[in-house]
Each structure stands twice: as structure tokens, then as C-alpha cells.
Image: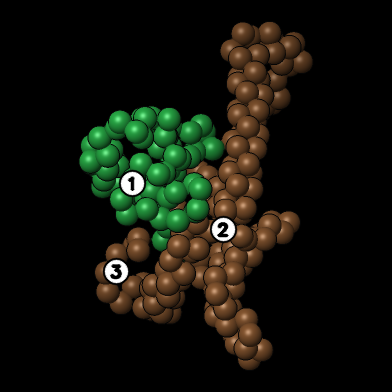
Amino acid sequence: MARIIHFSSQGDTTLLEYDPAIADMEEVNRVIAEYEAKTGAQPFDMATGERIDKITREQAEVLLVHPIAGG
Amino acid sequence: MNNRLPEHDAELTLDRPGISMALSFDYESRAELQRRDERAEAYLRRVVALTGAKHKRDYCVLEVGKTRFIVLGSHITRVRDVTDSMCQCEHTCFYLPSQYMPVSEKIATALLQLKNNPALFDGWLARKAILKPDGQMFADQPFFY
């Protein structure tokens, strides 16, 4: 099973859990895009540590990471 | 006027059920804070391994190409070119939207973001540059990049 998690020190939130072999990846990406629009959290692949533009069946664990500001 | 309570009043106060609840709540809060710190520390260790950063005592060092970032709880130093001995350090602060977040979680977030987009730092420096000496901004700028 693949998981999309939002880490928090208060406890992780599992946003989605799905079987990548049969899941509708368009739907997965739509849910993530909505969540990103609402919270600003951005998806990262936890196997490589890279930011993901589009989630594919190869990604087993995706972490949503807070946006960051500076100045 | 005597503001001191008689000793037996203090004893009565301690017997009230609300007080013992407050004490136990305080203990629970402390335990929860400790759990949060431990979770954040584990998260940082994972992110350090993922990004190839080095975890020092209370900061992390991340190298992206020739650029070195030294990330503390809310402050980042950049050495743009570590091969250039004349290269000066640049500094900026960083912020996350959550009001309370353990330091380890802040550092982990900064490491992931900077590893993927080291140019974020340029945006923060530019934002810093548009501040007037009194801290006011010259123009409205988007806060998050």
C-alpha cells in the first residue's frame, strides 16, 4: 500500500492510503492538489527526498511538507 | 492590610479536587511535549539521511553543489561557494506557518525545502533587502516563496 502523510510532531495525518497497482492516480493527484491549495503543504517523495510535481504509482510514501518563508 | 493567607487555608486549597487535576494536567502536558520532541527528532534523523545533511549538536549542515547551508532553529547561514576561501557568509531567518513546532521539525522542513530548491534562499535575501531600517517594508511582497 502507498501512503500520503502529513508529518506533525503532534501525530502524523495519513491523508490517503491506496493500492498503487489499481488506484486512480488522477484522483490521488486531485486530492493532493486540493490539500496543497488549502494548506500550502507540498508533496515530497520519502524515498528520494525530492519534491513531487505529480504522484505516480512508483512512489510508496509521500510526505506533505510545510511551506517555508524567510527574510 | 495582611495579604498572607492563614496556613490552614493553604492546606484547604491543596485539598480541592481542581488543584490535583491541574497538577496532573501539567504532568500530561510535559509528557506530551516530550513525545512531540522525540517524534520531531526521529523525523529530523530521517530527513538528514535523505538529504545527506550532517547533524551537529543543535544545527544541521547541508551541502548542495558548492553551496553550504547551516540550518538552525529559525536561522540559516549560506556559504555560496565553499571552494572560494573569500566567499562571505549570508544570513537570513526563516519561518513556518505553525505557531508551535519543535526545533527539529523546523530544521527538517528547511533541509527538505533547501535541498530541492536552494534558490529559495535568494528570495529570502531579496525580501530582507527590501526592509527599511525601521523594519517596515518598501512594498508588499508575498510572504511565502
Distance (Cα) linking label 2 and label 1: 20 Å
| Residue B141: numbered disc | 3
Determine contact: label 2, label 1, CB under 8 Å: no
Q: Residue at x 61, y 14 (%)?
A: B21
Q: Which subunit holds the residue at mark 2?
A: B
Quadrant hosting residue B32: top right
Q: Is residue B4 above or below residue B116?
A: above
Which of discs 2 and 1 lies nearer the camera? The answer is 1
Residue occupied by mark 1? A55
Q: In the rendered image, which residue does mark 2 sit on?
A: B51
Depth check, mark 1 against mark 3: the one in front is 1
Badge 1 local density, few (<14 within 10 Å), some, or many (20+)?
some
Residue B46 x/y as whole percent: 60, 47
Question: What amino acid type should be assigned to the residue bearing mark 3?
Answer: Gln
Write down the chain letter for disc 1. Answer: A
Mark 2 or 3: in front is: 2
The quadrant of the picture occupied by the C terminus of chain B is bottom left
* Residue that appears at 51% across and 32% down: A11
Q: Secondary structure at mark 2?
A: helix
Q: Extreme front residue here?
A: A21
> Which image quadrant for residue B56?
bottom right
Amino acid residing under circle 1: Ile
| The chain coloured green in the image | A
